[in-house]
Image: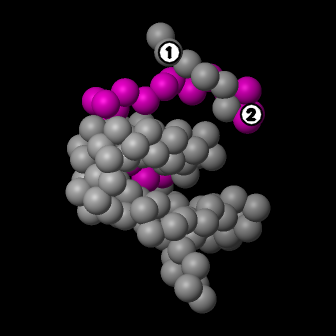
Amino acid sequence: MNESTSPTNEPIELLTADSLVGPQEGVVLRHVAGEHMLVPSVAREVDLDSLFLLNATGVFVWEQLASEQSVADLSAAVAQQFSVDPDAAAADVVTFLSSLLERKLAVRA
């Protein structure tokens, strides 16, 4: 099994092209004063220490997580949407999704 360690020292299984990732329940995308951020809420309170800022690519990927897509499908969509090299898109998507998983803003589907 391929694993790495998260900042909390919990093992995280590495993503593959077939991996499915979805949004964590209670995490919402907010657009405030020109900034895009993921906001996790717990029992109607916002955890301000867990805000996660996104660029346009991050917003695009986050919005795609609503439908069940593989890492490969997400990577292809990013490559097409932003006219970037498919290999670069795949590396960026894996890095982004891994960050979301480590921060518990997303879950493996």
Tell me: residue 6, above or below residue 43: above
Front residue of 24/70: it is: 70
- Badge 1 vs badge 2, beta-carbon distance below 8 Å: no
| Residue with the most extreme top position | 1
* Residue depicted at 55% across the width and 19% down the height: 3
Q: CA distance from mark 1 to mark 2?
A: 18 Å
* Residue depicted at 37% across the width and 27% down the height: 16
Q: Can you give x and y, in whole percent of width and height, for residue 30 in the image?
A: 52, 76
Magenta residues span 7-24
Image quarter of residue 43: bottom right
Residue at numbered disc 2: 8
Q: Can you give x and y, in whole percent of width and height, for residue 9 in the image?
A: 73, 27
Neighbour tally class for label 2: few under 14, some 14-19, many 20 plus, Cα within 10 Å? few
Residue 104 in view: yes
| Residue with the most extreme bottom position | 33
* Residue depicted at 57% across the width and 44% down the height: 99
Tell me: residue 106, above or below residue 15: below
Q: Is residue 2 left or right of residue 73?
A: right
Q: Can you give x and y, in whole percent of width and height, for residue 44 in the image?
A: 62, 71
* Prevailing secondary structure of the magenta residues: loop
* Amino acid at dot 2: Thr
Residue at numbered disc 1: 2
Q: Earlier in the sequence, mark 1 or mark 2?
A: 1
Residue 75 in view: no
Q: Can you give x and y, in whole percent of width and height, for residue 91 in the image?
A: 44, 39
- The circle drawn on residue 12 is none
Colouring rule applied to residues: one colour
